[in-house]
Image: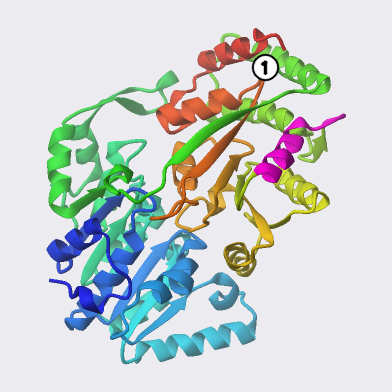
Amino acid sequence: MVNVSLMKTIPWAHQLRELDSHADDIARALWWQPRTGKSKTIVDNACHLYEAGKIDAVIVFAPNGVHDNWVRRQLPAHMWGSVPYMGICWKASTAGDNAPRSAKNEWNSKFLESLTFKGLVVYTFNSESINRIDVKKLLAKIAKKRIFMSVWDESADFRRPGAKRTNAARHFSRYASYRRILDGTPVHNSPLHAFSQMELLKKGCLGYTRFEDFKMHFADWEKAFKGRGLKVKNYKNLEELRGLLAPYSSVVMRSDCEDLPDLIHRERIIPLTVEQKDILKALIAREKIQLEGKDLDISAQCSILSKMQQVCGGFIFNKWGVPLPMPGDNPRIEALIDEIELAPGKVIVWAQYKPELKLIKAELLKAGFRSVQYHGEISADDRAKALDDFASKDAVKVFIGQPQAGGRGLEILADTMIWYSHNFSGIVRAQACERATKMGHANVEVVDFIAEQGPDRYIRDKVAATLTIADDLAGRGLKRVLEEIEGNEL
């Protein structure tokens, strides 16, 4: 049994149940929805195993940026006072082959110190780095010197059998004395995604060592369009699969947590200018002609909707990839300023496209609002500073981010969240919506910007229903969408 008196922070009931019953298990999967306390549970579990003399290290793999958050926030918040610890985060900018010599020397010195440190060492790596030769060498050194627990945070990143990242992860996990996988949305698109994630815990733990056998048992297949391989016709034997998962798994839903705030959803309808309507009409007419008698691949389908989405946002890329602003006013940015002025506390704004992010930053500055940015063009160090500034400085009111970059694993407490434009992945949306929530925090208002005509509602609703628009779209289905938009009196 875990010694609760040694914990730095008091556990919630579901955390304590997990630790009391399974802290000493070799392999464990925490399928806990976002914001239900997976990270604290892992820190407590690691401290318990260290106190019992069973491990002296933890290796965490997490999405880029989230892995830094473990060292910067989770460890200081939850590590037991009785456990001497050292946190060391790998970043390409400070430890990679192309890092500045001074930064790399400093990191290497700390790494060498960690190998003989008398206490618990927590190493964190971003999930993508596991394929790197330099990272593999570091992991080999750790495995030789330390007895460790592996933690695969957002384990759905390793869901694809045969992918280089997945194969590297499965190989390395065999060296861990204890193994944990964490994810709030592990099999949203397909129950077949469970196979590779569970292989990180124990080879063959679902009764199959080959994915080919696993997928044939749990799904029926049919020929894809024009003979392009096979596609899932339907899933089957799912009750059996649940039974195979159960011995290793813990499931916690938002509804199981009384103190987790609600997400209060609201729409704001955004009018279109005459210029935007004219361009949408031209786009629709062109795409309908191209769609006649054709079934487009997924990338082409999403490209059409993306173009329309851009027009509604006030810009469009030309054929050279240069973003051009729409002539006239931009009702969407005007609505954003209005919402932020009315918001009582801090605000998160999610936007899909880089031109939108830049425009939002500039317009907020004109309106007198301080903001921080978190997206693909922001360095790892500046992302970390953005999180700190948003959390600690009252004057910083707005967090501007791309959900792909900032929508997973981070704590970004706010009172209002605005979806300025909509992402095409339901998993990304579900994760991003939870970033502002925390046990005991106030409810969060989620505002969806929906153009009065255009693809916003379709993308948002299909994402909510199917969790990925790519699963729903087909060429002829897309044609119907265009007809619906055109018929709505553009």
Residue 41 shows up from this direction: yes
Was residue 329 drawn as part of the magenta stretch in this picture? yes
Give the magenta range. Answer: 326-342
Quarter of the image where one finds residue 235: top left
Q: Main secondary structure of the magenta part?
A: helix
| In the displayed structure image, the side of residue 465 where residue 278 appears, left or right | right
Give residue 243's position: percent from left, percent from top: 12, 42
Could you tell me residue 262's position as x and y percent? 42, 42
Task: Please state which of residues 297 and 251 is positioned toward the viewer in this rendering.
Answer: 251
User: In the image, what residue occupies the spot 77% across and 18% down?
Assistant: 277
Image side of residue 314 versus residue 94, left or right: right
Q: Is residue 118 magenta?
A: no
Q: Is residue 371 left or right of residue 79?
A: right
Give the amino acid at mark 1: Glu
The part of the image, by quadrant, that contains residue 165 is bottom left
Protein image colouring: rainbow
Rendering quarter of residue 29 = bottom left
Q: Is residue 422 above or below residue 125?
A: above
Residue 120 at what x, y percent from top left? 31, 83
In the depicted structure, whether residue 197 falls above or below residue 124:
above
Q: Residue at x 42, y 76 (%)?
A: 76
The location of residue 73, given as percent across then percent down, is: 46, 70
Q: Which residue is mark 1?
A: 287
Q: Is residue 338 left or right of residue 180?
A: right
Name the quarter where the N terminus is drawn: bottom left
Q: Secondary structure at mark 1?
A: helix
